[in-house]
Image (cartoon, rainbow, N blue to C red):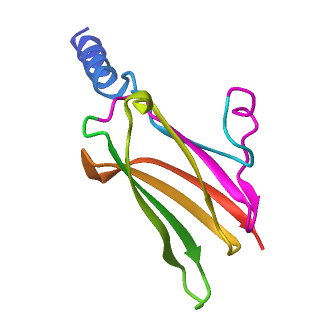
């Protein structure tokens, strides 16, 4: 009987520490067209080079400093080893109406596999949001 009670207590403690509610995370959506209410569901991750790549950063939590840092990185394998090449960086100050989102576009003229990382100036060592996309050659 004592063994069963001990097993139940251990199970409850493990459930308490491992099962919990997770917070909503920030996300990035890519699109071939300017993002608005009608085109927000037409997301894509494959783009043609030289065309605009529109993106939307959605933030469920308020960013206290109101500054974001964006990196666009290319996975570069030209030298026979897996490497990364920093393509673009950008600092953004969120306006009053952009507390929970930010939208803009960029253009890439090289084909390849890319990913975008967003950092908050509140915690610049932790990736706030990340997404991958591909530019056709």
Instruction: Name the side, left or right, on which 93 lies relative to 40.
Output: left
Is residue 54 rendered magenta in the image? yes
- Which quadrant of the rendered structure holds the N terminus? top left
Question: Among all residues in the image, which is located at the extreme top?
Answer: 1
Instruction: Name the side, left or right, on which 24 lies relative to 104.
Output: left
User: In the image, what residue occupies the spot 67% across and 32% down?
Assistant: 36
Residue 87 placed where, x, y %? Answer: 51, 72
Q: Magenta segment, principal secondary structure?
A: loop
Question: Among all residues in the image, which is located at the extreme bottom?
Answer: 79
Q: Nearer the viewer, residue 12 or 111?
A: 111
How many numbered callouts?
Answer: 0
Residue 8 placed where, x, y %? Answer: 30, 14
**Measured along the vertical axis of the image, is residue 75 above or below residue 38?**
below
Q: Quadrant of the rendered structure where residue 2 is?
A: top left
Q: Quadrant of the rendered structure where residue 128 is?
A: top left
Q: Nearer the viewer, residue 53 or 85?
A: 53
Residue 96 placed where, x, y %? Answer: 37, 29
**Measured along the vertical axis of the image, is residue 106 above or below residue 60?**
below
- Which quadrant of the rendered structure holds the C terminus? bottom right
User: In the image, what residue occupies the spot 71% across and 73% down?
Assistant: 111
Is residue 7 rendered magenta in the image? no
The stretch in magenta equals 37-63
Residue 80 placed where, x, y %? Answer: 60, 90
């Amino acid at each position: 009987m004592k063994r069963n009670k001990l097993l139940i207590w251990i199970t409850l403690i493990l459930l308490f520490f491992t099962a919990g509610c997770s917070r909503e995370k920030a996300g990035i959506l890519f699109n071939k067209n300017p993002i608005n209410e009608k085109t927000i569901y037409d997301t894509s991750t494959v783009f043609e080079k030289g065309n605009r790549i529109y993106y939307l950063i959605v933030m469920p939590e308020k960013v206290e400093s109101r500054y974001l840092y964006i990196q666009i990185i290319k996975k570069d394998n030209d030298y026979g080893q897996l490497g990364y090449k920093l393509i673009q960086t950008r600092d953004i100050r969120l306006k009053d109406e952009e507390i929970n989102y930010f939208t803009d576009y960029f253009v890439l003229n090289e084909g390849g596999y890319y990913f975008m990382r967003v950092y908050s100036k509140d915690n610049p060592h932790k990736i706030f949001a990340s997404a991958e996309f591909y530019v056709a050659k």
